[in-house]
Image (tube, rainbow, N blue to C red):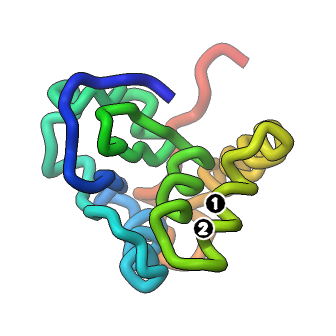
Amino acid sequence: MTAASATRAVALVLYDADCGFCTRAAGWIPRLGAQVEVSSLQSHDLAALGVDEDRAGLEMPVVLEDGTIAYGHHAWAQVLLRSPQPWRLIGAALDSRVMEVPGAAVYRLVAANRGRLPGGTAACALPPSSGA
């Protein structure tokens, strides 16, 4: 997690509105009963929020109440931690040290294939990684 400067009343979940899968996944957040604000990446000044724009294109960011930014599976854990049980318990498990490697791996797998998942389109595809 990285830190930003501003504080918020509730965590802000940012999703990629250009991606059908991301939009669909964001639509589930209110159904979980999560006490968060959900909004698109495109409707905010990411730099002002302290969100790394490049990283946000690869991993969903959540701006926490204290200004800290969580990305990827940690972001989803924070959403779940702000939801009623049993989601809160699942969020605590997902945010634990034991889930660091598998949580990150599963998140990368889903993100890399989001254009192939329900709601996904060719516009959802991540850019090819450079270097490797």
Q: Which mark is residue 11?
A: none
Residue most toward the top? 131
**Mark 1 surroundings within 10 Å by alpha-carbon count, few (fewer than 14), some (14 through 19), many (20 or more):** many
Q: What is the three-letter code of the residue carrying label 1?
A: Gly
Q: Position of residue 81 (x, y in %)?
A: 54, 60
Q: Position of residue 31 (x, y in %)?
A: 43, 85
Q: Position of residue 52 (x, y in %)?
A: 36, 26
Q: CA distance from mark 2 to mark 1?
A: 5 Å
Q: Is residue 86 left or right of residue 75?
A: right
Residue displayed at 55% across by 56% down: 76
Q: Which mark is residue 91?
A: 1
Residue displayed at 75% across by 52% down: 106
Residue 45 image-quadrant placement:
top left
- Which quadrant of the rendered structure holds the C terminus? top right
Q: What is the three-letter code of the residue carrying label 2?
A: Arg
The residue identified by callout 2 is: 88
Q: Is residue 119 left or right of residue 27?
A: right
Residue 7 image-quadrant placement:
top left
| Image: 95 above or below 87 | above
* Contact (Cβ within 8 Å) of mark 2 with mark 1: yes
